[in-house]
Amino acid sequence: MIQLKSVREIDRMAEGGAILAAARDLLEQSVRPGISTIELDRIAEDFIRSKPGAKPSFKGLYGFPGSICTSINNEIVHGIPSKKRVLRDGDIVSIDIGVLFEGYHTDSATTVGVGEIPEQSARLLDATRRALEAGVAAARAGNHIGDIGAAVQGVVEAAGFSVVKDLVGHGIGESFHEEPQVPNFGKPQRGTRLVPGLTIAIEPMVNAGRADTRTMPDKWTIVTVDGSRSAHFEHTVAITENGPRVLTASAQPRP
Ligand code: MG
Ligand code: MG
């Protein structure tokens, strides 16, 4: 069942989303060669818990051990922060963050280059970011879930990359994962109709090579089958009468 939110509930989600965005900005600035992913996890957890009423959504969610997910290079999502995973020059790292604030979750991800990254990786990050923007722009009342997927897929495939089909975005609110599913592929005017009050996580996961995925023996980390790199960008978005409202936007967007 889809849980539509009132304007008041959406405002509360935006407060949590602002905390999340500040944590995400802090982590982007913290990424550098030599830092481990467990250090990023601690920075995120300390920051989020320093805000009254806020805590990391992921800690313990389905038994996940971290406060954030950190997925390096060929890892698509759900990488577990570890002191053994040290970022190196040329890596890309996807950082996925959830914040629970006063009863409501928000969810956002970014992919960051570590030092100097290969040209193809830079194009992958750029295409995935643009795919998210296109998906958000399609998140308008009167459109359908398929319009979001079609917009994301169009940008990704025009850039020569593949959308991951095994993993999807989702409704979000009092539960972290709510209906409906939000695939990163689809056809315009298909699927659930978008109405004001719907809050969804739009999250393109894009592989430089083939779309196929597999799960590592740790039962969490999902990687590309062909070893190609993967990027992930995500925002929590509310459908409103006045168009899409990004609830996890940075206070001061960086150029
Ligand atoms: Mg996420
Ligand atoms: Mg999500």
Image (cartoon, rainbow, N blue to C red):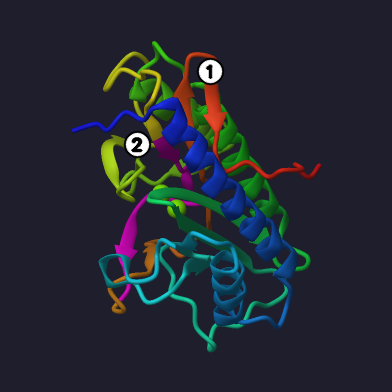
Q: Quadrant of residue 183?
A: top left
Q: Would you name the residue on which mark 1 appears?
A: 243
Report the Cα–Cα distance between label 2 and label 1: 20 Å
Q: Residues within 10 Å of mark 2 (few under 14, many from 20)?
A: many
Instruction: Give percent across and percent down for residue 66.
Output: 43, 74
Q: Would you name the residue on which mark 2 appears?
A: 183
Q: Any magenta on residue 209? A: yes
Q: Nearer the viewer, residue 113 or 235?
A: 235
Helix, strand or loop under label 2: loop
Q: Any magenta on residue 224? A: no
Q: Return the residue found at the far top.
A: 142
The residue under label 2 is which amino acid type?
Pro
Q: Return the residue found at the far left.
A: 1
Q: Quadrant of residue 95?
A: bottom right
Q: Nearer the viewer, mark 2 or mark 1?
A: 1
Helix, strand or loop under label 1: strand
Span of residues in magenta: 200-216
The residue under label 1 is which amino acid type?
Gly
Q: Quadrant where the C terminus lies? A: top right
**Which residue is found at the position 55% from the left and 62% from the top?**
52
> Is 146 displayed left or right of 68 in the figure?
left
In the rendered image, is residue 220 in sight? yes
Q: Residues within 10 Å of mark 1 (few under 14, many from 20)?
A: some
Instruction: Give percent across and percent down for residue 204.
Output: 47, 42
